[in-house]
Image: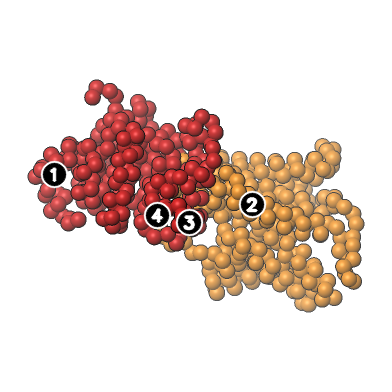
Chain colours: A red, B orange
């Protein structure tokens, strides 16, 4: 792998007052990789995502995407460049029906550019994408207002919104949390399909079994610092990881 | 007598709704309480007066042109002042209030007082409903008021920008994560609000004269309607406009006309005691920041 990385994060830091939420965090991500972020609660995983996607301004370090320094850019610019993210606590537009939630990302300038300057039939695209993530088409669940949808559908909606933006890098923040085993099992193939379609993916997960099955590589965070980085199996064998991660949490 | 009160109360309610729509729109989308609202209203009035009387434009051009200029003024205010203090509510209030205050006082300083500045009515004609005579300008106000409210609804429900407005209004972080430029939507929201203020000014001001003091009155009325209705709720604005509109008209008819200006103030106090979030407002929960 001599090619230049898709994403190159170096010495990324974020201090909240005296608390080092993320401290000198560095990693490289190659195109097409599926990278997992794991670590105990409060270890800084979501903050790293917020730093990469522009939702939080870093205290130091830099984020290079395709050779371009995007550190501290506004979130909407980063999205338009091709990095999409989902939220751990689902954040749909609660007053809008599920498929209207999809129309907003489909209006993104990036989607227009990727489609060659035309948006196409957004309603149809929205319904197709929703069906793909498990909104059964004949149940009309896609027309329901988001505030009445159960958690499982809201998580799927988060994923569908991310896909709608046609990102090159998709960051999924604890997509599986709060889902049943059966629901997770039904989403895994969707992620694998995206990945074999060429999308680069970062997954923050507590559901380790499922993650290790699909991830190429795993980075372990603890107290805002990287304590391990490697193939799934190797990482789990590391004594430090066992102590920091498994010692403090059962999942 | 009662029919007349009912009809004029209706017109007065629509006037209040017109005045408050723009304020509510801006707040609903970007969370900016635009205290320069009354000043923008008066600015639009004086602009169309100047364009009509000093520049010599036909009124049919002067009016829309002044709406455009007021909208630009709103956009500039957001771009160069509010953007820097975005999210700091107190600073936003102080900044907009300061801009409003200095604009209005500047008009005073420039001599826009004493003389009777009036805008022409669109059609100088009146009709009778039963025994009540009503002029065409008031009917025109009702038509424009309803048209603007309907337009706003269609705009937010069926256009790309409208959907972005609703996105930002419902969850700014989600909107950002989906590629919406919140700075641009914020600019547009203040600009739209200013344009609504300007349209209101142009249709309402011909009923009286343009005075600097009227700017403060407009702000108080807009605030009262929005606070009673619930900040950011368009339905609330309509309901509150009718409550206050009829309250004012009945006060003028059955008590005394100089008590009218007390009505919005009493309404603000009353609603703050009874239901601080307003009739249709939702007290937003504290959200986690990270």
Q: In this view, does A117 lie above or below A59?
A: above
Q: Tag 2, which chain?
A: B
Q: Identify the mark nearer the N-term, 1 or 3.
A: 3
Residue at image point 56% right, 66% down: B280
* SS at badge 4: helix
Q: In which quarter of the image is the C terminus of chain A?
A: bottom left
> Residue under circle 3?
A140
Q: Distance between the residues labelled 3 and 2?
A: 24 Å
Q: Residues within 10 Å of mark 1 (few under 14, many from 20)?
A: some
Say which of marks 1 and 3 sits in front. 3
| Camera sees residue B160 | yes
Q: Residue A154 carries which label?
A: 4
Asked whether disc 1 touches disc 2, contact meaning CB atoms under 8 Å apart, the reply is no
Asked whether disc 1 touches disc 3, contact meaning CB atoms under 8 Å apart, the reply is no
Q: Residues at marks 2 and 4, common chain?
A: no
Q: How far apart are marks 2 and 4 (CA)?
A: 27 Å
Q: Which mark is residue A236?
A: 1
Q: Which of B208 and A104 is in front in this view?
A: A104
Q: Residue B154 carries which label?
A: 2
* SS at badge 3: loop
Indicate left or right for A193 with B241 as reference. Answer: left
Q: How far apart are marks 1 and 3 (CA)?
A: 43 Å
Q: How crowded is mark 4: few (under 14 residues within 10 Å), some or many (20 or more)?
A: many
Q: Residues at marks 4 and 1, common chain?
A: yes
Q: How crowded is mark 2: few (under 14 residues within 10 Å), some or many (20 or more)?
A: few
Q: Which mark is residue B273?
A: none
Residue at image point 10% right, 42% down: A238
Q: In which quarter of the image is the N terminus of chain A?
A: top left
The spot of residue B239 in percent (x, y) is 65, 67
């Amino acid at each position: 792998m001599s090619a230049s990385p898709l994403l190159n994060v170096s010495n990324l830091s974020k201090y909240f007052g005296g608390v080092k939420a993320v401290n000198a965090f560095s990693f490289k991500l190659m195109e097409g990789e599926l990278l997992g972020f794991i670590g105990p609660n409060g270890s800084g995983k979501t903050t790293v995502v917020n730093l990469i996607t522009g939702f939080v301004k870093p205290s130091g370090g830099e984020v290079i995407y395709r050779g371009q320094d995007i550190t501290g850019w506004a979130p909407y610019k980063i999205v338009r460049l091709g990095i999409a993210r989902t939220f751990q606590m689902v954040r749909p537009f609660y007053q809008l029906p599920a498929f209207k939630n999809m129309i907003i990302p489909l209006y993104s300038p990036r989607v227009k550019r990727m489609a060659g300057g035309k948006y196409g039939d957004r309603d149809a695209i929205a319904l197709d994408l929703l069906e793909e993530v498990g909104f059964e088409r004949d149940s009309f669940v896609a027309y329901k207002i988001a505030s009445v949808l159960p958690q499982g559908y809201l998580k799927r909606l988060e994923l569908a919104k991310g896909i709608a933006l046609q990102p090159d890098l998709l960051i999924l923040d604890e997509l599986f949390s709060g889902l049943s085993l059966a629901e997770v099992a039904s989403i895994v193939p969707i992620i694998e399909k995206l990945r074999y379609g060429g999308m680069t993916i970062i997954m923050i997960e507590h559901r380790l079994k499922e993650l290790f099955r699909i991830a190429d590589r795993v980075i372990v965070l603890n107290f805002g610092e990287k304590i391990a980085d490697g193939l799934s199996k190797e990482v789990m064998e590391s004594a430090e990881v066992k102590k920091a991660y498994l010692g403090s949490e059962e999942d | 007598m009662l029919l007349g009160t009912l009809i004029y109360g209706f017109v007065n309610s629509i006037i209040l709704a017109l005045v408050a729509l723009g304020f509510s729109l801006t707040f609903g989308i970007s969370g900016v309480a635009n205290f320069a609202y009354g000043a923008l209203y008066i600015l639009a009035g004086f602009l169309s007066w100047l364009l009509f009387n000093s520049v010599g434009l036909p009124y049919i051009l002067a009016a829309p042109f002044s709406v455009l200029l007021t909208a630009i003024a709103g956009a500039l205010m957001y771009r160069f002042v509010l953007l820097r203090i975005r999210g700091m509510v107190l600073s936003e209030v102080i900044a907009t209030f300061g801009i409003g205050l200095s604009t209005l006082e500047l008009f005073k300083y420039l001599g826009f007082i004493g003389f009777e500045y009036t805008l022409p009515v669109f059609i100088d004609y009146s009709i009778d409903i039963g025994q009540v005579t009503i002029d065409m300008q008031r009917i025109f106000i009702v038509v424009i008021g309803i048209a603007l409210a309907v337009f706003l609804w269609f705009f937010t429900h069926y256009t790309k920008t409208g959907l972005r407005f609703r996105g930002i209004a419902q969850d700014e972080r989600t909107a950002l994560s989906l590629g919406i430029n919140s700075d641009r939507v914020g600019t547009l929201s203040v600009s739209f609000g200013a344009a609504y203020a300007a349209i209101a000014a142009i249709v309402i001001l011909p009923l009286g004269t343009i005075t600097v003091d009227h700017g403060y009155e407009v702000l108080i009325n807009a605030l009262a309607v929005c606070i009673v209705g619930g900040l950011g709720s368009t339905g609330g604005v309509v309901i509150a406009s009718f409550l206050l509109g009829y309250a004012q008209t009945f006060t003028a008819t059955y008590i005394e006309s100089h008590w009218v200006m007390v009505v919005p103030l009493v309404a603000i106090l009353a609603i703050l005691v009874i239901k601080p979030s307003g009739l249709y407002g939702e007290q937003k929960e504290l959200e986690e920041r990270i």
